């Protein structure tokens, strides 16, 4: 759990910087980045480069399209991130289980990992069951008891999805779709063995995650997590809390989330997430949200709220619409929610993703609760000196990025600019443009923004081939991974020198981590 001292660290540190990298993008032989040795080495690289923050994407179990923003649970961890070598060390697997497995580096192999790790977790769960009593068994029982409020629903949800051939929960038989007590009891016994595997997988995920987070803290590195505002329709959250969402009697959405036409898409983005019944949330004292924030803040040191503007008003699209064009703004009681959060947890370290169509009301909500906003330098050029993303217009209460996971890499962005646009960037930065993306990285680090986050792809000077996500594109996203040996001493020293030059170099918390 995060201590008060750790939270005060970020209140005292005036200028910090870090790197954006999702754990799936780490190298490793088993097809996907994991919470194993490469993650620890990345933390060492961060600390040695003077970086205070590791920003990640959501950690939930990914569903369709492998998107971390479309998860089967807002509380569970992604089993695909479990390091099988750590399970060997724990005695849950044999070394022979991993022998001869080596997938190509540089890209994510989600399909392979799902099958490979799925088999290993079944074997690991069986071995763990046979080990009997002991400290780790006691830790497992404690985990299942403390997290029962989400774990029980998640485990039976995943077991049922497998049994019903991965169909969405609203296509299951009525008695279990509607969660009748008799059906829950029957399926809980019928699928007991599979349910135990899913509980074991969650236990080992968080066993590995909290060990990694503790190591990061020991090196002075804090984790910046990511909390999507919406949850997937086909998720344990919606199935277990149907009254909190705009659904009909068959469990099909009436209103879905998205954004109107914008920079990324002329028809907007139709995300498809069912919208919340905020009046039902309020009647329950926002209990579901408070539990969600509490658990996310236990896992990380800070949390970025994705699509923060949705807490003031959300773009509501009738479910039958094929695009996001024909929607309307619906008001959301965000201020009430954040007051309840403050009353329950005190001042929380939240960063607001306030991109897109931001109104004065959204800005007022962010400022009322003191949440830093985000400024993207790729958006800063081409519209004159008043552009709010230009460094001379920034305030300290913000997080400065060259780009995010939704942007092209900075080198890819630079290469796509017209000659006139490039000239404008050169003139503003006072540079030749021959050292992009480092010229934009320098501008981000030099800015007055208290926080500065750089995607690893920019530090590696990679082009569009390394882009993490293209909003609105159904497939081909989330697959980039860096390769072993990419994080050399020269890169570490270059980043460390610039970080120190602009007053952001890592300063560990007082009296140690």
Image: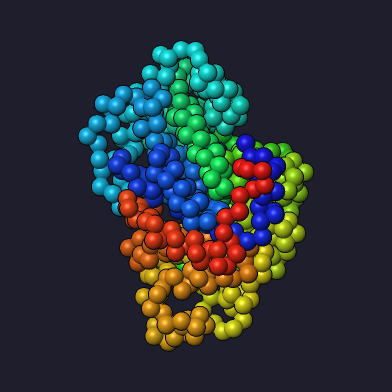
- Which corner quadrant of the image does residue 144 belong to? top right
Q: Residue at x 43, y 58 (%)?
A: 492
Give residue 436's position: percent from left, percent from top. 41, 73
Q: Is residue 252 above or below residue 159?
A: below
To which quarter of the image does residue 63 belong?
Answer: top left
Q: Is residue 4 above or below residue 433?
A: above
How many numbered marks appear?
0
Q: Which residue is nearer to you in this view: 320 or 70? A: 70
Q: Is residue 264 above or below residue 25?
A: below
Q: Residue at x 38, y 18 (%)?
A: 127
Rendered-image quadrant of the N terminus: top right
Query: Where's residue 99, x and y in %?
Result: 24, 31
Residue at position x 52%, y 22% in the image: 140
Residue at the location (66% across, 67% down)?
A: 396
Is residue 108 rendered to the left or right of residue 331? left
Q: How far from the left and from the top, in percent, is residue 62?
A: 43, 43
Which residue is nearer to you in this view: 417 or 184? 417
Name which quarter of the figure residue 504 lies in. Answer: bottom right
Expressed as whole percent of the image width and height from the top left, the position of residue 48 reads 48, 53
């Amino acid at each position: 759990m995060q201590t008060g001292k750790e939270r005060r660290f970020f209140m005292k540190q005036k200028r910090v910087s870090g790197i954006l990298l999702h754990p799936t993008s780490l190298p490793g032989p088993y097809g996907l980045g994991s919470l194993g040795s490469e993650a620890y080495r990345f933390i060492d690289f961060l600390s040695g480069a003077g970086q205070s923050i590791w920003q990640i994407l959501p950690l939930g179990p990914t569903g369709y399209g492998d998107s971390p923003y479309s998860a089967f649970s807002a509380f569970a961890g992604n089993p695909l991130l479990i390091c099988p070598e750590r399970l060997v060390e724990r005695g849950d697997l044999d070394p022979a289980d991993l022998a001869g497995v080596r997938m190509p580096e540089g890209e994510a192999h989600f399909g392979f990992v799902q099958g490979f790790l799925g088999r290993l977790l079944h074997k690991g769960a069986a071995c763990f069951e046979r080990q009997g009593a002991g400290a780790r068994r006691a830790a497992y029982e404690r985990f299942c008891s403390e997290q029962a409020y989400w774990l029980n629903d998640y485990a039976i949800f995943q077991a049922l999805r497998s049994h019903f051939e991965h169909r969405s929960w609203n296509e299951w038989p009525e008695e279990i779709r509607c969660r009748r007590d008799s059906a829950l009891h029957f399926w809980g016994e019928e699928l007991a063995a599979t349910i135990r595997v899913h509980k074991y997988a969650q236990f080992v995920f968080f066993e590995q995650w909290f060990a990694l987070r503790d190591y990061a803290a020991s090196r002075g590195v804090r984790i910046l997590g990511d909390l999507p505002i919406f949850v997937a329709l086909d998720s344990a959250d919606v199935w277990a809390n149907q009254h909190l969402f705009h659904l009909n009697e068959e469990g099909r959405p009436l209103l879905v989330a998205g954004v109107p036409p914008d920079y990324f898409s002329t028809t907007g983005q139709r995300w498809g997430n069912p919208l919340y019944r905020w009046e039902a949330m309020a009647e329950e004292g926002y209990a579901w949200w408070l539990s969600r924030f509490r658990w996310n803040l236990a896992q990380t040191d800070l949390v970025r709220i994705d699509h923060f503007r949705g807490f003031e008003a959300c773009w509501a699209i009738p479910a039958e619409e094929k695009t996001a064009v024909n929607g309307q703004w619906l008001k959301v009681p965000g201020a009430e929610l954040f007051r309840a959060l403050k009353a329950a947890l005190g001042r929380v370290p939240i960063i607001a993703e306030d991109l897109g169509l931001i109104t004065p009301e959204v800005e007022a909500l962010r400022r009322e609760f003191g949440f830093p906003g985000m400024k993207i330098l790729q958006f800063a050029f081409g519209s004159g000196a008043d552009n709010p993303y230009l460094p001379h217009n920034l305030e300290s209460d913000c997080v400065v990025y060259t780009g995010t996971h939704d942007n092209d890499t900075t080198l890819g962005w630079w290469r796509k600019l017209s000659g006139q646009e490039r000239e404008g960037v050169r003139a503003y930065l006072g540079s030749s443009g021959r050292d992009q993306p480092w010229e934009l990285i320098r501008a981000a680090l030099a800015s007055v923004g208290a926080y500065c986050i750089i995607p690893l792809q920019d530090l590696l000077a990679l082009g569009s081939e390394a882009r993490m996500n293209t909003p609105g594109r159904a497939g081909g996203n989330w697959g980039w991974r860096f390769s072993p040996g990419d994080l050399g001493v020269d890169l570490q020293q270059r980043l460390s020198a610039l970080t120190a030059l602009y007053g952001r170099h890592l300063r560990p918390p007082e009296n140690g981590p």
